[in-house]
Amino acid sequence: MNKNKIIIIGGGISGLATAWLLRSKALAAEKELQIVLLEKEVQSGGKIKSIKTDGYTCEWGPNGFLDSKPQTLDLCRAIGVDNNLHRSNDNARKRFIYSGGELHQLPDGAPAFLKSRLISWPGKMRLALEPTPFIASAPAGVDETLADFGRRRLGGEALDKLIAPMVSGIFAGDPETMSLISCFPRIAELEREYGGLIRAMIRLAKKKKQDIAAGKVVSSAAGPGGVLTSFREGIQYLSDALTTSLGGIVQPGSEVTSVQKIDSSVYSVRCSDGRIFEADQVIVASPAFAAAEMLAGVDDEISGTLRQIPYASMTVICFGYSRERITHSLDGFGYLIPKKEGRNTLGTLWDSSMFENRAPEGKVLLRSMMGGACFPEYVKLSDGEVTSRVMQDLKLTMGIDAEPEFVRIFRHPQAIPQYTVGHGKRLQKLDELLKAHPGLILTGNSYRGIGLNDCVAAAERAAEEAMACN
Ligand SMILES: Cc1cc2nc3c(=O)[nH]c(=O)nc-3n(C[C@H](O)[C@H](O)[C@H](O)COP(=O)(O)OP(=O)(O)OC[C@H]3O[C@@H](n4cnc5c(N)ncnc54)[C@H](O)[C@@H]3O)c2cc1C
């Protein structure tokens, strides 16, 4: 069966990478495909946008990807932009948590952990129980929340001060609702395989040493690891390069309103301006809530299941200052604030410390995050209210008294999909339902990972699946 007309809907990293990978696979297999990518906005890139203004480079969404996984790096190599990669400097390795009135550096080993005042002695003793048989093992067949997992394995204090901030830093999520297996499948796997996280870390560190001694190339042991990587021009350089390389395939300003099935294997895709495209395959790379609307005419149940994937809102606030107005060393990546601290922001990234060219000479750029699943109403705050709340937090956490001389506020009403308990079941159901619609493929950050690396990995799977139908 030759299915050569393919429509991709959505031109974020997921759609762009799918189009690029599909085209290269077709070229390699000497297959002729007609690929069209329909993107609603005039600019492709989706959540990726690097806004240059007054000498600052403000990232609207992601500020890079980790080089510990191969997917985005491989894509950069394939499209020929790997020479322009800009890795964050070593400062970016130091990460902090604000707790009890001060910033604590996240300890990077057992001695530093014992010295750290972030976790109290009773909290440390509770953590020390983690590798022992006193800790209940994972409940069989239960889709456990991240909060339940944290309390069970590490104790309440570690949940509040380590796990919850990490969940808000990555997903802007609430650990009381998020699913361990869907958000961090590797952690669930480590517990199953090694009987605990500390045991896993010890075993993997040992293995890493042995591999290094044997001259093997090794990646980070258990955690995300890696170096935050972007481009001197900002991360938009990547989506721009993909868009340019795809040429006429990308059709910006094309909002898809509906997909219909003409017969068992031909689809029609309608845009808001009245254009209609026929396709043998449709790859939907828009967020789940948008996919739900456009697929209502294809399958009610698919649509309903997609609607059950919730999104958290987020506000990103960029503040620029003259360096001399800030007494803090800004030596690091930035910090996260546990919800229990009762502050306004989720944390602040020291963007110009990670990538020095993000601010003009003699200036610094700080990027704070506000909102997320725990504070959904914050996205509605006025600019004045947002600015004053961020200033309150910066004063408390870093002693910054000065007014910022540069302010940009970006609101994302539907920022990040939330993999809540039941997400895995929803994905299984979608996979089942999609079997009735050959040629219809879902990809993007709504399903199996939200990082840029995850989106590129999902794009690879989508491109493979589309090729398999040809
Ligand atoms: C503030 C923030 C910070 C982040 N930081 C990082 C980070 O540092 N590192 C990292 O790895 N990840 C980060 N992420 C996550 C990452 O940016 C996203 O998961 C990823 O960019 C999503 O890509 P996507 O293509 O799946 O979706 P999107 O980028 O949302 O793209 C979907 C596209 O579909 C289009 N679309 C929607 N409806 C229609 C329609 N009807 N017709 C046609 N097109 C349509 C949209 O316009 C959009 O372009 C961050 C996310 C946010 C919000």
Image (cartoon, helix red, strand yellow):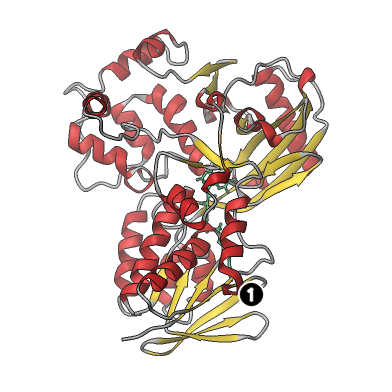
- Tell me the quarter of the image containing the N terminus: bottom left
The amino acid sitting under disc 1 is Ser
Which residue appears at 50% of the width and 26% of the height?
A: 93
54 and 115: which one is in front?
54
179 and 320: which one is in front?
320
Which residue appears at 42% of the width and 81% of the height?
A: 32
Query: In this orientation, does residue 88 appear?
Result: yes
Compared to residue 290, the image places residue 201 above or below, namely above
381 and 212: which one is in front?
212
Quarter of the view holding residue 128? top left
Q: Position of residue 231 (x, y in %)?
A: 60, 43
397 vs 4, left or right, is right
Ligand 1 image-quadrant field: bottom right
Q: Is mark 1 within 8 Å of ligand 1?
A: yes
Compared to residue 327, the image places residue 161 above or below, namely below
Quarter of the view holding residue 47? bottom right
Query: In this orientation, does residue 173 appear?
Result: no
428 vs 225, left or right, is left
Which residue appears at 70% of the width and 39% of the height?
A: 317
Q: Which residue is the site of mark 1?
A: 254
